[in-house]
Image (tube, rainbow, N blue to C red):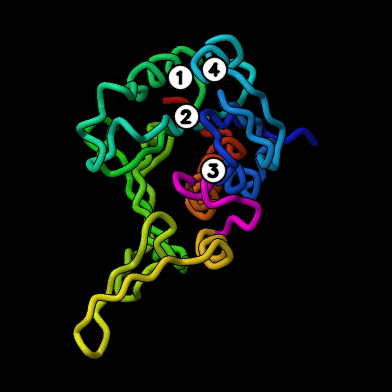
């Protein structure tokens, strides 16, 4: 039986791709940087050019445009980073395929009716809020977001006051970050902007259900 094919644009080291694969998709990743740790079929190419030429060959498409333009901490550097959400969406709509666009909280206003996912919804050691535009899917019942535990910070350091009231800085090691994210194959650099696979497993399950039940999942 042929599995549904999913195109993973701006794929990085494969956090999103792993979740979609776990949901049953045959995943192909595309990135302009050679991603030697990507765990599925990989094509080194410009994401926009590739989807324009090949997007129609896939059953579903997921895109995670680079987030630097939308990061609040990098506002001063926006001129050096392109806004890729809108040009990506235009090309995805041309394909006529069900699609998902993911990005950071700073990009929320540019996404259409996005849902927010947090690592605490899936019992992960990270929070890492990410927003997903999913026009092909019905209203999803989201797990609760619970910030009662101190998260593992994959990027940067944790700052907490000890019993004496002194601020303690703690940098988490690679092994702990991999465990918290659910990405044991990734480097620290790869994890900096990665999506925990649990997020796209959740979305991928809904996409797969729409496809296998014959429901029209197009946007």
Badge 1 or badge 4: first in the primary sequence: 4
Tag 1–tag 4 contact (CB < 8 Å): no
Q: Which of disc 1 and disc 2 is earlier in sequence?
A: 1
Do the numbered discs 4 and 3 sit on residues whose CB atoms are within 8 Å?
Answer: no
The verdict on residue 108 being magenta is: no
Q: Pointers 2 and 4 in contact (CB under 8 A)?
A: no
Q: Looking at the image, is mark 2 or mark 4 earlier in the sequence?
A: 4
Instruction: Examine the image and state in which quarter residue 136 appears.
Output: top left
167 and 12: which is toward the camera? 167
Q: Which residues are magenta?
A: 182-194
Q: Is residue 181 left or right of residue 76?
A: right
The disc label shown at residue 204, or none = none
User: Mark 2 or mark 4: which is in front?
Assistant: 4
Q: Nearer the viewer, residue 179 or 159?
A: 159
Quarter occupied by the C terminus: top left
Q: Kindly identify which residue carries mark 2.
A: 99
Q: CA distance from mark 4 to mark 3?
A: 18 Å
Give the CA separation, mark 1 to mark 4.
14 Å
Residue at 34 percent of width and 67 percent of height: 158
User: Which residue lies under the disc numbered 3?
Assistant: 16
Q: Residue at x 66, y 30 (%)?
A: 28
Mark seen at residue 92 = 1
Q: Which is closer to the viewer, label 1 or label 4?
A: 4
First of labels 3, 2 by sequence position? 3
Provide the residue designation for mark 4.
46
> Marks 2 and 4, Cα distance to the nearest angstrom?
18 Å
Asked if the residues shown at circle 3 and circle 2 are in contact, with their CB atoms under 8 angstroms apart, the answer is no
Q: Earlier in the sequence, mark 3 or mark 1?
A: 3
| Residue 101 percent across, percent down from the top left | 41, 33
The correct choice, above or below, for 215 with respect to 180 in the image is above
């Amino acid at each position: 039986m042929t599995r549904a094919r999913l195109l993973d644009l701006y794929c990085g080291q494969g956090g999103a791709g792993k979740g979609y694969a776990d949901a049953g998709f045959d995943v192909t990743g595309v990135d302009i940087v050679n991603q030697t740790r990507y765990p599925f079929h990989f094509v080194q190419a410009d994401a926009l050019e590739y989807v324009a030429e090949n997007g129609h060959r896939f059953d579903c498409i997921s895109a995670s445009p680079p987030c630097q333009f939308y990061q609040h901490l990098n506002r001063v550097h926006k001129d050096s980073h392109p806004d890729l959400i809108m040009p990506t969406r235009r090309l995805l709509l041309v394909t006529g395929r069900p699609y998902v666009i993911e990005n950071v909280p700073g990009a929320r206003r540019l996404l259409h009716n996005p849902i927010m996912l947090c690592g605490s919804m899936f019992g992960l050691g990270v929070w890492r809020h990410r927003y997903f535009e999913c026009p092909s899917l019905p209203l999803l019942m989201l797990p609760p977001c619970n910030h009662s535990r101190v998260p593992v910070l994959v990027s940067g350091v944790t700052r907490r006051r000890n019993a004496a009231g002194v601020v303690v800085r703690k940098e988490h090691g690679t092994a702990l970050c991999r465990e918290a994210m659910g990405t044991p194959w990734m480097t620290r650099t790869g994890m900096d902007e990665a999506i925990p696979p649990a997020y796209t497993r959740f979305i991928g399950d809904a996409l797969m259900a729409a496809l296998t039940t014959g429901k029209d999942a197009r946007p």
